[in-house]
Image (cartoon, rainbow, N blue to C red):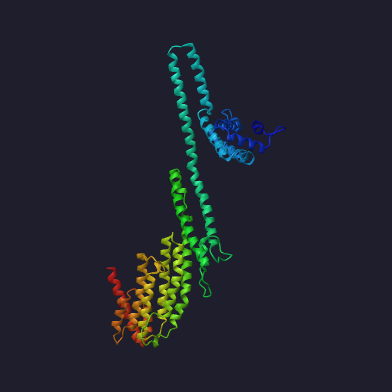
Amino acid sequence: MFARLCAGGGKGAVSQRTLAEACGVVDALEPAVKHELIQWFLASQLQEYEHLFSSEQECAWISFVERRYAWLKKYLLRFEESLAAIFPASWRLSERLAHRFCKNGSIEQSSTDPLGCLLWASYEKYNNTYKQMSVSGTFDRVRRHAKSVLKKYKEWKAKAAIDVIVARIAVVPAELSGVFGKYLREYAGVLQAALPRAAAGVPALVSNLHTLLRDDASAQRYTRPELCKITSVITTSEYCLETTVHLEQKLKEKIAPALADKIDLTPEQDLFHKMISNCIQLLVQDLELACEPALQAMTKISWLHFDNVGDQSSYVTQIIMHLKNTVPNLRDNLASSRKYFTQFCIRFANSFIPKFIQNIYKCKPISTVGSEQLLLDTHMLKTALLELPSIGSDVKRSAPTTYTKVVIKLMTKAEMILKLVMAPLDGNLEGFVSQFLQLLPESTIAEFHKVLDMKGAKLSKAQMSSLDALFKQITKAASGENNK
């Protein structure tokens, strides 16, 4: 019954349902019956393989080993489609067929070499003949020599095969690097296309990603899902970047030293670096866009008519609210990329605080009490910015030193500007210039003029010229001291 199945059916073919029921009966009998049927079936199914890849066939050589596995794959697919349903799943016939295939291949390794077989057959033939004739030990030398020749041949053949394989493998990594580079660049284009609000004509290369950066006043903020997309592109680009670095290292390890210079995935690494950088800039720009109305409200306050210093102003409260609403979400999305979250914080501080300082210069005219209120607001904002990396988190961590240095330096400048606005002139203009350069040693003469303008100083052209000359003189002297 099973033999007719293996022969392909025919007039006396048995239905698969009958065969499946028969297998169920065999499965219920003693294990020896099932074992005998399975072994017979495995042997019958691999007859075609043994014929196609016998030692007499050209395709039995090691250079055609891929044909063996192609045959197995094709056979297993055919078996699963037509015969697998007949046998109980517990028999695991697909696995048994693959195991028998590998076992047969292993046994063949010692016998499929035509020249080796020829040498060994010749040796065995004459060895048996001389044994039968009881020849003296003279033939022992011949027999030892034959064994030596056979051993050397096998060693030579193995070494030759290895040399050929190594020679081929040594060239492959150089070719692979070009393939990897091509598809890494294409994938960078896929990541860019995933960014929100990408214009239809935006080129695929990330070098033009700056076209996504918005600088118009009518721009709208990103939605929460859109921000999530941007952070996802950052984390994915980080993974691609790290993988590309390791890939280049591994390819250089595997390739021949003379070809190592041909492997260069630096352009692709730069591509993902640029992708990450531009995505961070998108996040910075979005948060700045949220804070912009509060900064505009800051300049519209009547600072001249303050009678007393109170709590922080409403514009500061609005800015802090936007920080609390936005940053925790970004921090969570970039939890696996802490260094890029830190970069975001640093970039935001480097971009937002100078804008805040420029808006301080616009708060004029301003009274002494107004300056004190603005100084209080600046201090409260400084405190909030120092806590930005962990804002809204139950777990308070110390902010990275690189970040706190940026915030302290820039916000201290804002505080010093306001202290200078509150400082009296009292006719001692030269003393004020010295005080200005002491508190703001890196400031320009344009900033000096802005502080005087905030103070509402009424100076003649001669006085301004004198102050400018003194400013340049002190600055030059300080620069000379620093260069010594």
Determine whether, in the image, residue 326 is placed left or right of residue 61. Answer: left
Determine whether, in the image, residue 172 is placed left or right of residue 405. Answer: right
Q: Is residue 443 visible?
A: no
| Quadrant for the N terminus in the image | top right
Q: Residue at coordinates 43% horizontally, 66% vertically from top-left? A: 344
Picture coordinates of residue 249, whole percent (x, y)? 43, 49
Picture coordinates of residue 282, whole percent (x, y)? 48, 67
Picture coordinates of residue 250, whole percent (x, y)? 44, 47
Q: Residue at coordinates 27% horizontally, 71% vertically from top-left? A: 481
Count of numbered tags = 0
Q: Residue at coordinates 51% horizontally, 75% vertically from top-left? A: 217
| 355 vs 83: above or below | below
Picture coordinates of residue 63, whole percent (x, y)? 54, 35
| 187 vs 376: above or below | above
Q: Is residue 86 visible?
A: yes
Residue most extreme to the right: 11
| 214 vs 191: above or below | below
| 132 vs 202: above or below | above
